[in-house]
Amino acid sequence: MTLASCLILSAAVLCVGIYGLLTRKQAVAMLLSIELMANSANMVFASYGHFRGGPSAQVFVLFALAITVAEVAVGLALVMLLYRRHGDTALDLASEARQ
Amino acid sequence: MNHLLATIVAAPAIAGAVLLVVPSTQRLAIRVVSLLGALVSLGASIQIALQYDRATGGLQLLETVPLVPSLGIHLKLAVDGWGVALLLLTGVIIVTGVLASWSVERRDKEFFLLLLVLVAGVFGVFVSQDLFVFFLFYEIAVLPMYLLIGIWGSSHEVPASGPFKFAWRRFAVGSKEYAAMKLTLMLLVGSAAILVAMFLLWGNSGARTFDLQVLEATKFPIGVQHVVFPLVWLGFGTLAGVFPFHTWSPDGHASAPTAVSMLHAGVLMKLGAFGVLRIGMVLVPDAAAWWAPIVGGVAVVNVLYGALCAASQKDLKYIVAYSSVSHMGVVMLGIATLNAAGWNGAVYQMVAHGIMTGLFFALVGLVYERAHTRAIAKMGGFAHVMPVVAGFFTLACLSSLGLPGTAGFIAEFMVFAGAAKGANAWWAVPGVLGAFVTAVYVLRACKAIFWGPAPAGEYSHLEDVRRTEWAAPLVLGSLLVVFGFWPRLLLDFIDVASQGYLGRLPLVALAQVVTP
Amino acid sequence: MTWADFDPGFTLISLIVVVSAFFVVRAQNMIHAVLWLGLTLLGTAAFYARLNAPFLAGVQVLTYVGGIVTLMIFGVMVTRRHESLEAEAATVAPERGLIFASAIFVMLSVVMWRSAATIPSPAPVASSADLARVLLNEYLIAFEALSLLLLAAIVGAVVLARRRDLETSPQGPVVPQATEVQP
Amino acid sequence: MSAVTLGLIATFAPLAAALLLWALVPLRHRGAPAAWVTLLGSVIALAASVKLVIDRLGGAPDVRTTIPWIEERGRAMAELGVQLDGVSVPMLVIVCLVALCVQLFSVAYMHDEPPRAFGRYFTLHALFLFSMNVVVVSPNLLQLFAGWELVGLTSYLLIGFYFAKPSAAQAAVKAFWMTKLADMGFLFGLLVLYVNTGGFEWTAVPGTAIATWVTALLFLAVVGKSAQFPLHIWLPDAMEGPTPVSALLHAATMVAAGVFLVVRADPLFAQAPATREVMLWIGASTAVFAAGLALVQKDIKKVLAFSTCSQLGYMVAALGAGQAFAGFFHLGTHAFFKALLFLAAGSVIHAVHSNSLDDMGGLRKKLPLTTAAFVIGALSLAGVPGFAGFFSKDLVLGALEGKASWVPWAMLMGSAFLTAFYMGRVVIKAFWGAESEKAAHAHEGGLAMTGPLVALALPSLGAGFLGGWLATQVRAEYHLHLGLTPIAASAMALLGIGAAIMVFGKGGQAPLVGTLEKLDAFSLVDKTWAGAYRIGLLGVSSLAGWIDRYLIDGLMNFTGWAALEGGASARKLQTGLVRDYAMLVVVGVLVLVLIGVLR
């Protein structure tokens, strides 16, 4: 297990998340993809933390986790709103910004 | 230390604040409060003129309050000779302007409030000796215009034509909203240029200060000067109607209500010229001397082109508006001469044109209010029904064409003499030609409106000047003649300031001046 | 890299994480997708454990697997359209996604490979005690700011989700989640 | 009282009258009292100037006092003041005397005007006298220019006095424009002088080249103001004004200001022989040309107007010949007899209510005094020996005699004949012959009308004998000599009168009249100027207006349009789809990473 392999693993997860974000229509599915991407960022933190030492990296992972939780809470609330308004959670429906 | 300068700026602002608590149904109270604010300013400006020591010159009546010392921003108020002349002009115009708009019907409280805010800004510009505060007041003076024109203005149609016809569908060209928007946007672009110049000066001053006196004493690198001067020239110049950035002026002044046209053409355009003179010429003299031929060349275009455009107009307000473009060209021409006669003439022209155009717009407003038309073709023989208006209009025309005995002559003559003495003597030729074209179009308009057989039909019962409407013609008309016969009333102030600042110009420029 | 460096544990974890992540974005059934996400997150927890970060692994299991996955399932259930769920989980323009994702992957791999080469060898382990000390000393303000953020998120979520024409009560899932995350 | 005080009184008494009338609106609107105020001002001015003359007869010296007017760097750049010498004092008397006579005449002549218009008329008269006196007493060219423009203004306002008549309005504006066009020359001349000498003194010695420039430019203004060819076209139109106005402004004083300017600036003109040569030719040709046109006018005032052009041509020619005194002398005598002629014509017009010569005839029985006055004026104008005009015209002709070219001299001789001829025509058509229908009810005006006629007839008869005194005043040589010129001139005058009696006495027509009439009707000069105005000014200005509205402002609109259109097309990027935004983020990341990789 080297730093490079750890980083490439996290890059892989990130790219899967990007793939999901770009291809899924469902708001919840997009949220899941974002979770994957956030997770991969945490993995990078943890990897560097392991290889360079010191607790700071882990602290940041903790913070990132908390922020992710907040994001999911608000994100899900938005999904609920979307569902109420359109009876569906396909995010394409929320494109009023175009007008 | 007295607080005259603070008073002159604060009086309109305080009157405006009082207006906020006056109920909008108290129409007389609104007017009286506004008039009081204006009168206090006028009184203060006269008091300033009396207290200013003409023999000493320089900055006087200094008041300083630190605002943001860490950035070198101070509320530093002081006045030089130019400032005294322009304060007097502003005081006179605002008082007559308030009286001329006595009959504003719609949302009068807001109207007077904005008018007072605007004039507070104008006073602020003329007395602030800190570049940042100068700019702040400048913006305060410029921005209320958007609302004043957009709400209280008047519209007309401009048919689509020309190579840019396709752009017409985007705008209602000629409408008051269009005029207000164009004016504001063009002036704001100018402001952006000024802002850049301002920070360049600040950053290169070494002292990190906006204090104009410190900046004056600073010798800026020539490279910085060459960037700053064109920015200042075009930035302030947009407000002064410098070709080809003058096109906000005809539409803006034609659409604006009477008092706003009076203030804008009478005073606000002077802010632009004053900025070029006070910031451009004084702070970056080396670049100014280099750029002066270009400034003067453009000014010459302004004079002649503005006059020719005015000659082609069929709408009374447009004629007056284009004449402002032409006359502000004379101001810029005087500035570009880089000698005492030219600068004195330029500042004198600011005052003369301010009074003259204020008178013009006041009278045009009167005519428009009664006849409900600005189309010259529909008018005729109005001298039979409104002889007083006709008389004062003729007087304004005469000053406009530079007839001796009116303020316009003194100003134009000094500018032309300055130009003839300067490095580019030929500037005087188009300048004088512009005055001739002015004679053609103002007298033609005067004849078409006022002369001819007595009007019949709807125009046969037009009323002449009454009550508060007397103020503007009487005061402004008399001043035109007084300043025409006795120029030293103002010149003593202006000349001492010009002498002081001229010393800063590089020797190269002065050497070009033929001294008899 | 030789076979001597081969690390079967890490390889297994990697496989689990990548494959389950792939199913997260490809699953037709949203519930399945969330469950796959749970597996990914568990794999990540194992990854943390292998990186000598047991506390992180624990928190990962507790908040992510325990909290977020549950929350997501609630979300899916609440917004579910019974009759047409399958069709809506469909993907759009998979080629575009694939191209961009792989391009990013290639780029990132190159960058990370280079960057990793500058870090020599594993450093001494940081204990949970170290972590706690740093968290509550150096990062105290950030820590408190974070709790404020969470509070704001709770309030925001409540305001957003609660409407007059309320059919379900969305506050329920959010509030316990927020309290749970306090370490 | 010192001379300066008297000069100031002469100048400011009319101004005080004008200001009083301007400020006291009820007084002005009452009418008659306004006339008395103006008359009082003029009387004071005349008294002051007469006192000046008496003082000068007693040996009072020339005086000159100035105060700074415009300052530059603390130094006077321009000055105002009073200069009272042999040129300005006689001129002051002439101006004040003629003005007073004309004003008095106006009281009767304008009697039927509504009180307000009457008041306005006299206010303007007072203003005119002030402006004219500013010209006369000015110590330098700048003040002269200021007064010059002010008399132009009063001329404009007085020509347009009947502003309800479109023709009067047009004539007023035309007069102002033409003179203003010429006045640009004055202004340029002043600027050239100022740049080269640092002042506006006519005593400056700037060298021949500069002097030629300055004087040529000044002469341009003279051409305009004194109605010389080709800028004369405004003067006949100016007859739209009330007749007394024509008498005062457009015959006696204002149009003579051009000549006065040259007399004043004689030291400058003396340095510029080239300018003088031009003046000589322009003066001579105007004299002939205008005399020819005067022959065919049907309007009595237009005859006199063209005659004024012609006589001013004499003066300009004399100035061109370098005999400033001859021009000045002719100016003085011409002021009297031409004012007399105009006032007498006014009396006729007042009696028959028409300007047209065809409506007159046989008036000598009804209007004996007017007839006598007119005949005296006509004889003086024709240059019959003994009358004032003879002496001055003789001097003018004598100035031209012996010049390198005899052509100008011959031209002026010819026009002397023409002058006598056309004046004979007018006298015969108006006062002799069969009594016309309109003349039947004609009668003399009151004392206010006849008094000024008598007052002006006296100098028209006798002013010629003052030539000697005037010459000592301006330090010129003056002696009557019996040579070719006086004899030829007298012969021309008598021949002209005789020819007129022969031709018109029997109701006939002069030869060449048809051609001249066609020439007059075609009015080539007028049409040229009108064309220049329409095409040159209106055309260019509409082009400028179009360019400004549709090109320059169009460009501004285009900028706005481009910004709006650009915004509209940029908005299409905003699909509103989160996926697309995410992709843009990804692209951005890609680019950033790529930069990182490649670096």
Image (spheres, coloured by chain):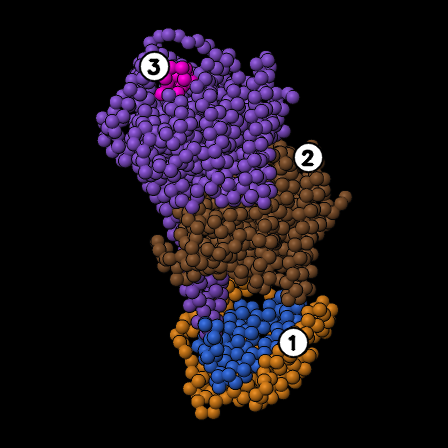
Chain colours: A blue, B brown, C orange, D purple
In the picture of the structure, the residue carrying the numbered disc 1 is C152
Residue at the spot 27% in from the left edge and 21% down from the top edge? D499
Depicted D30 relative to depicted D145: above or below: below
Which of the two discs, 1 and 3, sits closer to the camera? 3
Q: Pointer 3 and pointer 2: residues touching (CB < 8 Å)?
A: no
Depicted C135 relative to depicted D332: above or below: below
Residue at the spot 54% in from the left edge and 28% down from the top edge? D134
Q: Residues within 10 Å of mark 3 (few under 14, many from 20)?
A: many
Circle 2: element type: loop
In the picture of the structure, the residue carrying the numbered disc 3 is D490
Q: Residue B219, image x and y in percent?
A: 61, 37
Quadrant housing residue A46: bottom right
Mark count: 3
Q: Residue D194, image x and y in percent?
A: 51, 25
Q: Residue A90, image x and y in percent?
A: 47, 81
Q: Pointer 1 and pointer 2: residues touching (CB < 8 Å)?
A: no
Label 1 in the same subunit as label 3: no
Label 1 in the same subunit as label 2: no
Q: Locate the N terminus of chain B by quadrant.
A: top right
Q: Which mark is residue B54?
A: 2
Q: Is residue D315 left or right of residue B93?
A: left
The amino acid sitting under disc 1 is Ala
Q: Which residues are magenta?
A: D380-393
Q: Is residue D392 magenta?
A: yes
Of residues D510 and B91, the one drawn nearer to the viewer in this rendering: D510
Depicted D324 relative to depicted B456: above or below: above
